[in-house]
Image (tube, rainbow, N blue to C red):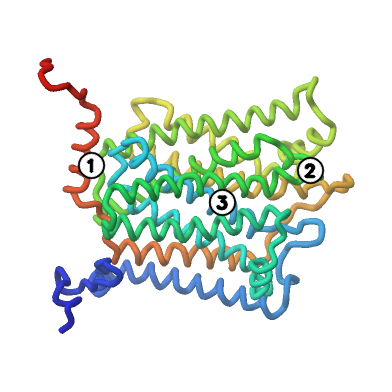
Amino acid sequence: MTMTELSTPQPGIKRFIKIDWNIGALKTASPRYWSFVWMLIIMTTLGVLAWVVVLTTGGNAMGQRDNFTWGMWFADYMFYVGLAAGGLVVYASVHLFGAEQFRPLSRLAVLMAGLLTMVALLGDLTDLVRVWRIFWFVVTPNISAIFVYTGSAAGFYMVLCFVDLWILVTGVGGEKLAFRMTLIALPVAIYLHTTTAFVLALNKSRELWNSAVMVPIFLTSAVASGVALLLICAYILQHYHVLEFKKSMFRSLATLLATVIIMDLFLLVVEIATVYWPTAAKAGHTLRFSEFLTGPYAWQFLPVLTLGIIAFALLAGRKTRHIPAVQITASALYVIAIFFKRYTLMSMGFAIGPLGQTQNPYIPSLVEALIAIGLLSMGMLFFTIATKILPLRVPLEEHAAASERADAASEPTLEPGVAL
């Protein structure tokens, strides 16, 4: 018997890289759990097979074309990168702003951020068709191409999230190292989401993309959808007794979500008002935006407004905001709304070409849809297994100690000899 096995806290748990992996939990998992896992494996396999079709037949298997060069892969990239923001914001609020009510979510939030960024990057690789071309992308980067910056930022951010998760789980470096990692991770996250928005905003020949509001509206959408997804996952894991959270934590998350949603909707309404305001309207902008309000692309954009307003209305009332069913419904609606928003953003630059030619709406091919579903299933598969075997539950003593530190920091410091 090795020293590692002797130090293992209990049977079924294996220690590797200083993490206690609960392998025994997989052996005792219910049939329902394994049915879900096998379903995800099958859908992931279908996605891999669809990718093989692309590798063997080329880009003809995709629904993209010369005048619509970005497809579902880029919409998914923006969507997943944005979702990853929510986890980082919640995690950063614990260490930077003392929001101790979110500490039980910290490990889960960082895990989700890492996995979502991983799925986003894998989607990028599928669009390369010949995936080995990534070698030249790395060794001979075009520094004027914004994809170089957002792609490298996504890779660094993903690694940073997993390193951060290791630090949180193992406790290496304590609170001081976790704080320093937050100081690194938050600027990198902002840089990642900003450069992703710049992929659109810096295209001056695509009028609806070329807007300074693209960056802030991308950030607010990312934080809102990320917080919404985190809230949903927290409820699911609590339902299956994987993690336990206080009602006050969900109330704080719902309040944060409502605040960011109204900011996101405000920026969107401001952009629409600027496009159509009589003294500011430009023919190219109004013509293009009308395609998304009353034209063939309205099915993509109108749900953004409709679902977004409904989600905020559900969370706006103080009496209803703290009802679990209301929180989950509003969160689900806004995650769906942001997916449509990302799809709309991708389409806005291509609906009418630089020379004024109108394009038919882009429809993903079956191969693209299977790849997208496969990537989503892969991410869910890793998440499902990780929540089973990783120690994501924050120890009560750690949470209590952090709360005591926060209380001590808020108390007034008295000089010797001074009495209250």
Distance from label 3 to label 2 (Cα)? 23 Å
If you read the primary sequence from the N terminus, does the residue marked by circle 3 or circle 2 appear first?
3
Q: Is residue 418 above or below residue 146?
A: above
Q: Residue 377: x, y in percent?
A: 48, 65
In terms of image quadrants, where is residue 28?
A: bottom left
Where does the N terminus fall, quadrant-wise? Answer: bottom left
Q: Is residue 308 above or below residue 200?
A: above
Q: Residue 53: x, y in percent?
A: 65, 77
Q: Please, what is the three-letter code of the amino acid marked with disc 2?
A: Lys
Q: Are marks 3 and 2 in contact (CB under 8 Å)?
A: no
Label 2, secondary structure: give it: loop
Residue carrying label 2: 204
Instruction: Tell me which residue sits at (27%, 35%) in the image.
Output: 248
Q: Is residue 183 left or right of residue 117?
A: left
**Marker count (numbered):** 3
- View extreme (bottom): residue: 1
Q: Please, what is the three-letter code of the amino acid marked with disc 1?
A: Ala
- View extreme (front): residue: 416
Q: Residues within 10 Å of mark 3 (few under 14, many from 20)?
A: many
Residue carrying label 1: 402
Q: Please, what is the three-letter code of the amino acid marked with disc 3?
A: Phe
